[in-house]
């Protein structure tokens, strides 16, 4: 075995560790590119294989080269790149995870702070229709949904034509979307889910929101396709909050942001030097038992991997959807000035 210490560290973190090319040493070649020395492997030596914690595969397809995280004697490179997921190429898509691997494997923190457990390999979700829906523009102006949205200063025509919001007339009982405002969620231009908002008159007897069955909200950022093009991205809770704030906003569809969504945001933000703003609803839920405010928790979670993030605390009793876009922008700029943060809403080079 070429690196018994790394083998034991991986075994401690992941349990099962398999070997490929056992006992074989790497063969390196030194070249010069643009006047700079670079190193590449000609013959790949021993590889240590474990189950990847990010994509959920169970066939031990995360490969660590035995010289991973060692210093190259010629270039001084730390060789963190000598690890690769052969299942979904997770570390190529999210390169900052290599640094997380180094910290958490060598210094004893839980890998990705979640359990690695055997099971069926993750499968993509299947879209489920909410039922029979009607575009908002086809509803009578006196319809309760139109009146509710108008009272909250939303443009019904924009909601219908731009955001494809509709009203559910009928729905199977197991879906439960009837008499709800249906807001679809898109990813790469494809509808992948929806959220149904109940009207205030029915909120006493029914849950405020109903998501599509099987829709993994922890793995989706509403409006991310559009927001990631801006040099400032604003994180809010709900879809209506996101629509009110505008194109640079993303909704986490809850009071917290998942590790998966932190990875997605940080990966894009680090490539394009994006400023992140956390503007979750300010009021604390009665069932929230955290010692820290949920906005502070979200900022800390992102700051663990990326420094350009600031909190925005709105006044108690309000949320982005309860304000006008102009009021929200005023509070945003006032908070940024107080924290010496410069906001830039121009487009990035990435499309």
Image: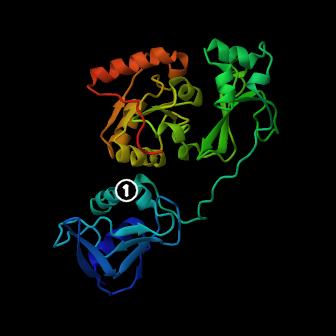
Relative image position of residue 294 (x, y in whole percent): 42, 32
The answer to whether residue 198 is left or right of residue 263 is right
Relative image position of residue 33 (x, y in whole percent): 24, 68
The answer to whether residue 95 is left or right of residue 341 is right
Relative image position of residue 8 (x, y in whole percent): 32, 73
Q: Is residue 292 visible?
A: no
Position of residue 256 relative to residue 259, above or below, is above
Check disc 1: other Cα within 10 Å, few if <14, some if 14-19, many if 20+: some
Q: Secondary structure at mark 1?
A: helix
Quadrant housing the N terminus: bottom left
What residue appears at the point 46 percent right and 25 percent down from the top-left corner? 284
The residue nearer to you, when weighing 1 against 68, is 68
Position of residue 42 relative to residue 330, above or below, is below
The answer to whether residue 79 is left or right of residue 86 is left
Q: Which residue is mark 1?
A: 97
Q: Quadrant of residue 194?
A: top right
Position of residue 165 relative to residue 51, above or below, is above
Relative image position of residue 217 (x, y in whole percent): 58, 42
């Amino acid at each position: 075995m070429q690196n018994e210490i790394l083998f034991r560290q991986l075994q401690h973190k992941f349990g099962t560790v398999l070997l490929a090319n056992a006992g074989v040493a790497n063969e390196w070649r030194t070249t010069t590119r643009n006047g700079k020395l670079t190193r590449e492997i000609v013959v790949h030596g021993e590889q240590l294989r474990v189950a990847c914690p990010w994509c959920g595969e169970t066939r031990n397809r995360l490969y660590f080269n035995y010289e991973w995280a060692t210093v190259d004697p010629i270039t001084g490179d730390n060789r963190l790149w000598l690890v690769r997921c052969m299942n979904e190429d997770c570390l190529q898509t999210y390169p900052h995870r290599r640094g997380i691997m180094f910290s958490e494997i060598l210094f004893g923190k839980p890998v990705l702070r979640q359990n690695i457990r055997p099971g069926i390999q993750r499968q993509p979700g299947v879209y489920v229709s909410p039922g029979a829906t009607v575009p908002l523009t086809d509803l009578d102006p006196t319809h309760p949904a139109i009146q509710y949205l108008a009272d909250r200063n939303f443009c019904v025509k924009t909601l219908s034509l731009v955001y494809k919001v509709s009203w559910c007339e009928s729905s199977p009982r197991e879906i439960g979307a009837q008499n709800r405002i249906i807001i679809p969620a898109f990813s790469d231009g494809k509808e992948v889910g929806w959220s149904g908002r109940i009207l205030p008159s029915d909120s006493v007897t029914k849950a405020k929101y109903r998501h599509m069955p099987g829709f993994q909200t922890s793995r989706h950022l509403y409006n991310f396709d559009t927001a990631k093009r801006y040099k400032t991205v604003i994180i809010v809770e709900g879809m209506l909050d996101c629509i009110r704030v505008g194109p640079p906003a993303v909704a986490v569809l809850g009071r917290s942001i998942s590790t998966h969504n932190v990875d997605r945001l940080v990966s894009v933000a680090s490539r394009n030097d994006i400023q992140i703003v956390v503007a979750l609803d300010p009021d604390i839920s009665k069932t929230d038992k955290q010692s820290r405010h949920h906005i502070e928790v979200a900022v800390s979670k992102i700051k663990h991997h990326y420094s350009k993030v600031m909190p925005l605390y709105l006044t108690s009793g309000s949320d982005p959807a309860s304000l006008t876009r102009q009021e929200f922008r005023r509070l945003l700029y006032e908070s940024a000035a107080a924290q010496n943060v410069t906001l830039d809403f121009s487009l990035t080079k990435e499309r």
